Amino acid sequence: MGKREVILETAMRLFNRDGYQAVGVDLIRDEAQVSKMTLYKYFATKDALVEAVLDLRHERFKASLLLWISHCVNPAERLRGVFNWHLRWFSSAEFHGCMFIKAMDEFHQVEQHLATARLHKVWMRELLSSTLNDIGQGKAAEQAECLQVMLDGMIVNASLFGVSASVDGLWRYACVCAGIEYAALDAPQANLQSVF
């Protein structure tokens, strides 16, 4: 792994765990074991580093979720797969909330970061809409917005309280919204480090 990748991985781990504002470039430099000159060679500003981390997180999120649902045999299973993936993520050791929600909170004046966060959320809504459309849901776009808000709420709730039984109740409600038969979510894998 090259120095740029080491810096990105380190920054992603620290930003995910501690937030963007709480983590300074000196800590990233020290944890990545690079000089400040090397850090600034690859990322001229902290904002540039944050943007690169958000881009990388988005790509990893997409790749992981799409791989997870690629084995689903029908659209109803695909929707269940989306919720199962989120449940696995909430149960993983690296779960500290959504880096895009954190970015919207911490950088509400930085349009570039907001645009990247919006792109991520739009991608998720489009995946849900496509899945609901494949199920035959007549109001797929409207229902996708509701399910996206539900997933974002589940992320925040899991950040505050950990994984709880409320996930199953929300999944039951999602089944009603989608017009599909309820099937229980899978129990999350014990000692899972990451879904990414």
Image (spheres, grey):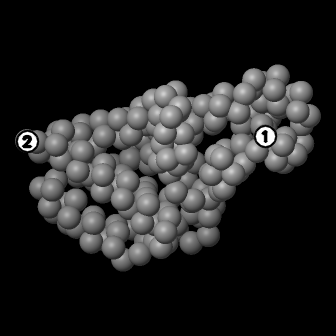
Q: Given the image, on which type of amino acid does mark 1 rest? A: Val
Q: Is residue 171 left or right of residue 70?
A: left
Q: Earlier in the sequence, mark 2 or mark 1?
A: 1
Residue 138's tag is 2
Visible in this render: residue 13?
no
- Residue 28 in the image, given as x and y percentages of width and height: 79, 44
Q: Is residue 40 left or right of residue 143?
A: right
- Residue 58 in the image, given as x and y percentages of width and height: 51, 37
The local crowd at label 1, few if under 14, some if 14 to 19, many if 20 or more residues have their Cα within 10 Å, is some
Q: Residue at x 22, y 67 (%)?
A: 172
Local secondary structure at mark 1: helix
Task: Tell me: residue 58, above or below residue 82.
Answer: above
Q: Residue at x 36, y 59 (%)?
A: 153
Q: Is residue 12 left or right of residue 58?
A: right
The local crowd at label 2, few if under 14, some if 14 to 19, many if 20 or more residues have their Cα within 10 Å, is few
Q: Residue at x 27, y 71 (%)?
A: 169
- Residue 194 in the image, given as x and y percentages of width and height: 60, 56
Residue 64's tag is none
Task: Tell me: residue 40, above or below residue 12.
Answer: above
Q: Which residue is mark 1?
A: 25
Q: Residue at x 64, y 35 (%)?
A: 50
Q: Given the image, on which type of amino acid does mark 2 rest? A: Gly
